[in-house]
Image (cartoon, rainbow, N blue to C red):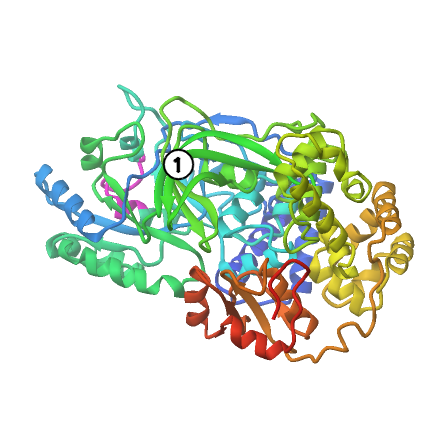
Amino acid sequence: MSGDIQSLIDSLVKDVERHQDLYYKRAMPEISDMEYDAMFNRLLELEKKYPQYARQDSPTKRVGSDLDNKFPEVSHPVPMLSLDKLYVPEELEEWVGKIERDNEEELSLLVEEKVDGSTIVLHYEAGFLVRAVTRGDGYTGNDITENVRTIRDIPLSLPEPVTAVFRGEIYINIDDFNALNKDKENIYANPRNFSAGCLRRKKSSEVSGIPLRSFVYEWFSGKRQEGGPGPGSAVPPDGGHSGLHIEVLHRMTQLGFNVWPDIGFFSSPLVQEKYEEMFKAHPGWVRRSLSDISDYIDRKMGKRESLGYEIDGLVVKVNDYKTRIKMGHTSHHPRWAIAFKFKAPQAVSKIQCIETQVGRTGRVTPVARIEPVRISGSTVSNVTLHNQDYCTSLDIAVGDVVAVSRRGDVIPAVEEVLEKNEKGNKTYLINRNCPSCGTALVPDGAHIFCPNSNCPARVFGRISFFTSRGQMDIENLGSETIKRLMELGLIADIPDIYYFDPDALLGVEGFGEKKIQLIKDGIKRSKKKPYDVVLASLGLDDIGPKAVELLIDDGYGSIDVLLDAAGQKNMEIFTGIHGIGPRTAEKIIHQLNDPAVQNMIRKLKAAGLNFSYERGRDEAVRQVFSGEVWCVTGSFENFKPRELAMEEVKKRGGRVTSNITGKTTHLLAGINPGGKLAKAKKSGALVVVEEEFLKRIGNYAAPSGEKQQ
């Protein structure tokens, strides 16, 4: 009986693995999804009923568990060092020439793609995957074995009883990333951050449904050499090869790993002849002489956009392991490999410290304070690090030397770590408690939040947002003024703006009669703002201008009607509105049923703000911008702030976007237009100057105190 059960399980394992290979790797399925599911479920049932016969490498291990992972730290058997980097082809030629001069033996090099993913270190014992570890600081990483087991192209067992350590990269294809990130409302900046975030999820069952993929590119013995560990220990014992990396890559494909399908091999024709049979087995591999490396790299750069996954450069490696050992390594990188990056960083700086900021919705964002650098004409000293996943994927720490850019010419961002700090500082981790109020932070998707709505940082954030340009636009109530009013105890939340007495500021340093009058005028004008602006300015999570527009178009033209609908706590009421998904619907219901939010709305209504939409207000204006998408840049004579121009666009049926995209049809360009002008011309958007814009909208009356046309 036991033999029959074991044989049946073994047979099912073999069949399931075969059909997984046909479906996931070859895209040639032979059976229907229903037939496959029945086969898989049968195997699952047998393993649950007879756990003593379940195999360690069963494909059911890829389903994952609902138990929380702990991610304990694990020391690497050899250092997983970073790579030194070059950005100019001439520098690469110099690097290759120096290696040739310093080594007596004939040189051969390999060029592999540098996938923009997350490094993984895979431990196999007697052919079975026993541990998967992140790179961490290069010496210690986190055990994420259960999550990695769910990745279908990483073998759970090898066809030979190999005991070794393999290094590779886990990534996600661009199309898969775009589809999944869209479902998550684009909370991830790029595929690298997405894959890193997935690998850190606490429940492996959540990872199993994500199409992560892998490439493996190094084989380590897992044993430390005498005289200290080093990358030279990459020669696998009894690996069935002569200590050459090209043979290692070939052997890894025989073991079931994915390696680069189109590596470049550069050597003399005499050396290449030795590998004739190997190249027949890998028709995508390219053979060239050493002098052809630059041309090969140029061609690879040209094909970059056609790849299904993101690469940010190429890696050039010495082929012979004996030469690698002879060349050695620094504390930061091996001397036998170099990364050629496709794009040089706009600036290089060092991280002085990392702090956490709390926004109006409670989202906690790490911010790096860096040594000031000039980028695109501006001095940058603060750089966002987005979230914990971003910090982890970059392996970023205080003291690191980093490449910094300005994404979209606006947001300063750390692109990568160029050199690890020498003080032993480890990857930055966000504190478990809010830095402002001390409340325990809670995770939600890729981000971490302070749940305390009365947190001082959250209160300051939502008041500042409410008064800012593009929202209620209350003149002379900027962030510094709001901070001072809070310190004086004059305002404690948004409604207090309309109830405190500005004359109480007389005699306070920095507040003269003129400024106080301007504050009064700004508050008075803000009461005329329409309902859609007021609702979006409350700063409620996911209830921004677009969501408000969708709600009004669907008939929720007053706050009373909207509160009544939210009070029914039926998500289908809102998910039935085209453009509103389950996440937004859930947040609308949750926030509009919050007594604190309801109390804020009551006070603002009593203060005289508009909480109903005047039908016909926009219809009375000719819809000259219907079907058009506008963006604005620069400064103007008649529109101060420039957001006033975009309000005119919306009143006349147009849509507004903050950045130039493929859907942008018009750019309103003023004085000093910046980078958006070039982007508009490149994208084909029509550039319109202020005089032309005024002709299209007809008579325009600017708000009191502004220049009028």
Q: Is residue 398 above or below residue 388?
A: above
- With 348 as the anchor, is 55 left or right in this view? right
Report the label total. 1
Front-most of residues 393 and 508:
508
Q: Badge 1 is on which residue?
A: 372
Residue 383, image x, y percentages: 48, 40
- With 122 as the anchor, is 573 left or right in this view? right
Residue 437, image x, y percentages: 70, 27
Residue 129, image x, y percentages: 50, 38
Is residue 183 visible in this depiction of the protein? yes
Overall secondary structure of the magenta section: loop
Q: Please rate how many residues cluster around mark 1, counting C-alpha atoms within 10 Å: few if below 14, some from 14 to 19, many from 20.
A: some
- With 311 as the anchor, is 645 left or right in this view? right
Q: What quarter of the picture does the C terminus occupy? A: bottom right
Is residue 125 visible in this depiction of the protein? no
Residue depicted at x 20% and y 57%: 294
Residue depicted at x 64% and y 67%: 32
Query: Which amino acid, by three-letter code, is at mark 1?
Result: Pro
Front-most of residues 283 and 3:
283
Residue depicted at x 32% and y 49%: 344
Q: In the image, is residue 283 part of the stretch drawn in magenta?
A: no
Q: In the image, is residue 245 part of the stretch drawn in magenta?
A: yes
Residue 364, image x, y percentages: 62, 37
